[in-house]
Image (cartoon, grey):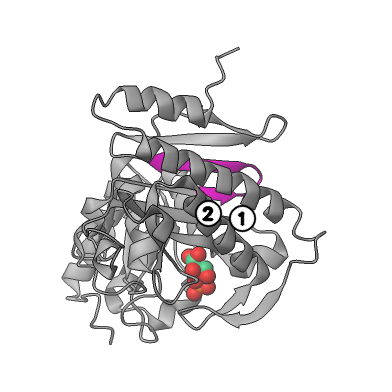
Amino acid sequence: MNKLITLDEFIWQKQKDFPFATGELSGLLRDLGLAAKIISREVNRAGLANIIGGADQENASGESVQKLDLLADNLLISCLKNSGECCGVASEEQDSFVAIPSSKNAKYVVLFDPLDGSSNIDVNVSIGTIFAIYRRVSEGECTLQDFLQDGVEQVASGYVIYGSSTMLVYTTGNGVNGFTLEQSIGEFCLSHPNIQIPREGKIYSLNASQYKNFGLGIQNFVEECTDLNYNFRYIGSMVADVHRTLIKGGIFLYPATKKRPEGKLRLLYECNPLAFIIEQAGGLATNGQQRILELESTQLHQRTPVFMGSPNMVEMVEKHLADTNTTTSTIK
Ligand code: P6P
């Protein structure tokens, strides 16, 4: 039987690889792991604890908020407050960033989507938490500039998928590793070391009901995938669709549409962290023309079209966009 390596042990081992590491980032990752374990427990008992269903509130993007969203948001904020390693957080569920005065001199800020795919909560489909960690750029209490950094500045990013098992997948810029929650001991254990995305994918994942709202380039891409007998898979939960893409190969795309010419998915706490993971696993992540990680961050809740996955499929869709001169903002 292989040695069980817990997330804490792994983080501690990796920290030793960095002689100048002082432990703050390791502490932050451990605290995110703790929050994930608590959220996992609540997600797994949601049906029993009468916390399923809408919370009759709307989030910063004007979308109805599920009770578990609120619970996950509060849990993450309190875990990060207690960590002492984070001077502020930004969340999909919060209009603006939340400064943490008790840790105002801490080195890091964290951005997260506390429970992505929450519309799937009531039907027991996989949902997830997405996080991005940056070094702060300000002095004293954190400012908006600490959060409006481009994706290339991420120190670490990751996601937790609450599915048939709960997994935490993260990168600090030296590859991608996956940990599965062993419920009987309450520990995330290394289950997917050094994840590499298959270079040649044959699965495409997008909301096909929007076909008529896609630009010609995307329509031609879908036609080519059909002609090549590629498999179509779409869960409607970004973390689940991207996790499958990471493990099985393929492409996840949420293009610009007539209804949403700027795309639907958020740059700072959905696309950037997942793009970092995909690139670290050997994949590509773009907005159709530019690397996601190089897009300019100007607003906390800004959106972007996103194409991420195996290099062959991202290059294929980019060619269709170029051949039809369909940029992300010109949807006819
Ligand atoms: P649509 C979930 O609401 C989400 O934010 C992502 O998790 C998911 O990829 C996308 O929206 C699904 O959007 O328009 O296909 O329902």
Question: Which residue does the image show at 49% across and 46% down from the upper left?
Answer: 32
Residue 240's disc number: 2
Main secondary structure of the magenta stretch: strand
Question: Is there a contact, CB below 8 Å, between mark 1 and mark 2?
Answer: yes
- The residues colored magenta run 160-171
SS at mark 1 in the image: loop
Q: Is residue 168 visible?
A: yes
| Whole-percent x, y for residue 81 in the image | 48, 54
SS at mark 2 in the image: helix
| Whole-percent x, y for residue 312 in the image | 28, 49
Residue 135's disc number: none
Is residue 165 one of those drawn in magenta?
yes
Amino acid at circle 1: Ser
Vertical order, 9 against 269 (above or below): above
Q: Nearer the viewer, residue 259 or 95?
A: 95
| Whole-percent x, y for residue 183 in the image | 69, 35
